[in-house]
Image (tube, helix red, strand yellow):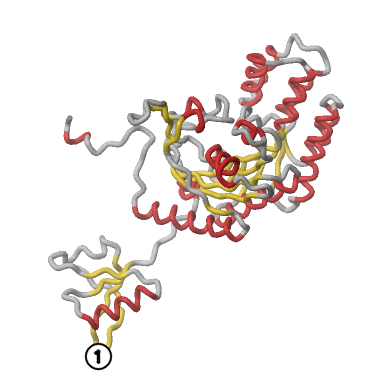
Amino acid sequence: MNAKRRWLLPEAIEDLLPAEARQVETLRRRLLDEFAANGYEFVAPPMLEYVESLLTGSGRDLDLRTFKLVDQLSGRTVGIRADITPQVARIDAHLLNRRGIARLCYCGSVLHALPANLTASREPLQIGAELYGHAGIEADIEIVRLLARALELGEVPTARIDLGHIGIFRALTAAAKVSGADELELFALLQTKDVSGLRDAVSSLAEPLRAAFLALPECYGGVETLDKAAGILPDLPEIRAELDALRRLAAELRGLPLGFDLADLRGYHYHSGVVFAAYVEGSPSAVALGGRYDQVGHSFGRGRPATGFSLDLRELARLVAPTAGQGAILAPWPDNEELHAAVAKLRAAGAAVMYALPGHEGTWREAGCDRALVRRGSEWIIETLKED
């Protein structure tokens, strides 16, 4: 192999260099500390699982994004996780086995066979929070508030949080007796807001269901969208209940930049109720996705109401204004016990201190030092690093 190519990484896979890695790690600690303060316990699932477990409950939504290989020990097919949420659902269902509420959070790398878009990494650093055991709207309210707080801690201005409800689409397909491949086609057309294709797909449906499907892409905007939808969509009990749930979310989350999008059908085989997507200034794509996914627990043999969200820390870090980290302090060499004591005191106070190994004069600013520990009389003091 050409030596010049040995350092190249696969497409859409990248290193994190010191400045970006520091930004990502700062955000990781900040968000996990906030989750812990809200009672969310940290779990760390494995990177690799048998595909039967890894893809359980996710339907086709994760299958094409999951790297698969054969385990040489068992001969079975394993997958590298493309999403941590199903793993956390497995932990809640079979390892914790709690009767009441479980609040769990996580942070780890996932791997995608294909990038989500042209600029996305295939190795997102996924962080998220999940709430299990409460079927009421209160759990959705808590999760959306926690998401808003996470973005606030990330110091990126939140443009809007769009809310939708997968149950509205399910109610319409049930009333129209649409299922199988036709249902999936409608789902895909609505997800991409392909109005022309949608019009052709519903041409054979009777009114008012035909008009209802065509109206969904137009049900987008502020809280007034919910009243608009109530006037356009069929007066079905399920749709009334789902619009009422969204109205309550709007009332309880007053003060957040909420929007509503009734054609937002991400994760059709995965989500089962309220869904949401958060957008921030400087990014055309959603930076965080979430919603209710009660059916995943059933797939693991223990039905548990569940709602949560996740985001990619790498992507969030790119949107945060860069901050200059505090430079390190350069301690002289050779060292002695008195110098060791001075360095230990500085490190205990939170400073980064590195020893000036001999033979590298003139390179310490490049290594991250901006100050120097020097002896002045009987005292050790810190001065600005002077370097040619």
Q: Residue placed farthest to the bottom in the image? A: 378
- Circle 1 crowding by C-alpha within 10 Å: few under 14, some 14–19, many from 20: few
Q: Residue placed farthest to the left in the image? A: 359
Instruction: Compare residues 307 and 355 and report the one nearer the observer.
Output: 307
The type of residue carrying mark 1 is Ser
The residue that appears at 54% across and 44% down in the rendered structure is 311
Indicate left or right for 124 with 305 as reference: left
Rendering coords of residue 24 (x, y %)? 44, 52
Kindly indicate the quadrant of the structure image that contains residue 354.
Answer: bottom left
Task: Report the number of discs.
Answer: 1
Rendering coords of residue 57 (x, y %)? 59, 30
Q: Quadrant of the N terminus?
A: top left
- Whether 226 is drawn above or below 354: the answer is above
The residue that appears at 33% across and 29% down in the rendered structure is 72
Label 1, secondary structure: give it.
loop
Indicate left or right for 280 with 344 as reference: right
Instruction: Compare residues 225 and 63 and report the one nearer the observer.
Output: 63
Indicate left or right for 326 with 206 as reference: left
- Which residue bears the numbered disc 1? 378
Indicate left or right for 194 with 126 as reference: right
- Whether 32 is drawn above or below 268: the answer is below
Rendering coords of residue 125 (x, y %)? 46, 44
Rendering coords of residue 306 (x, y %)? 66, 41
Q: Quadrant of the C terminus?
A: bottom left
The residue that appears at 22% across and 81% down in the rendered structure is 337
- Whether 293 is drawn above or below 16: the answer is above
